[in-house]
Image: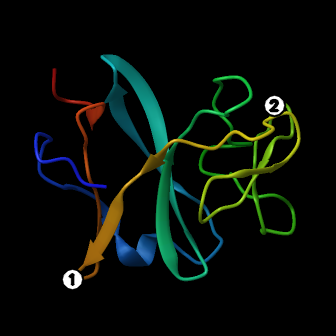
Amino acid sequence: MLDDDASPPQRLCASAELQERGKAVSFDVIQWREPVRAFALRFDGQAVAYLNRCAHVPTEMDWQEGEFLDGDRRYIMCSIHGAVYEPLSGLCVMGPCTRGRLTKIAVTERDGEVYWHPTRDTKPAFQD
């Protein structure tokens, strides 16, 4: 859901940069006044974005920069403890993240560009 009190949509990348089930685009946000990494990827044709924080333990999840999907490229997997998430919903489906979910960041695409939508709790990294 979009937040009327938040900043305007922020350009993230060109739509073509998010290849289907490929490498994610990482970006910085401020959540509750703390810097946090986030990522966007394309799965089943949809651009999705989440905070780069495992629901099990709040650590960054990528294996290498931008690599979040498991070997079969079917799930987002935390490289630290093996928590497994459904890419479109962020819901934990296996591992130590039981009933947890990733923190979703709203994204939209228009005119060949991907934008993320800040909220009251998640702002662009350059804002106070």
Residue 62, relative to residue 69: is it above or below?
above
Q: Is residue 39 left or right of residue 23?
A: left
Q: Position of residue 97 (x, y in %)?
A: 78, 36
Instruction: From the image, tell me which residue sits under label 2.
Output: 80
In this rendered view, identify the residue nearer to me: 19 or 4: 4
Which label belongs to residue 72?
Answer: none
Q: Is label 1 in a helix, a strand or a loop?
A: loop
Residue drawn at (65%, 62%) of the image:
87
Q: Is residue 124 left or right of residue 29?
A: left
Quarter of the figure with the N terminus: bottom left
Q: Which residue reaches farthest front?
A: 99
Color encoding of the figure: rainbow
Structural distance between the alpha carbons of marks 1 and 2? 37 Å
How busy is the neighbourhood of tag 1: few (under 14 within 10 Å), some, or many (20 plus)?
Answer: few
Instruction: From the image, tell me which residue sits under label 1.
Output: 111
Q: Is residue 23 left or right of residue 92?
A: left
Residue drawn at (25%, 44%) of the image:
118
Q: Which residue reaches farthest top?
A: 33
Residue 118, relative to residue 57: is it above or below?
below
How busy is the neighbourhood of tag 2: few (under 14 within 10 Å), some, or many (20 plus)?
Answer: some
In this rendered view, identify the residue nearer to me: 125 or 117: 117
Residue 87, relative to residue 64: is it above or below?
below
Quarter of the figure with the C terminus: top left
Which of the 4 quarters of the picture holds residue 101? Answer: top right
Residue type at tag 1: Asp
Exactly how many numbered labels are in the figure? Answer: 2
Residue type at tag 2: Ile
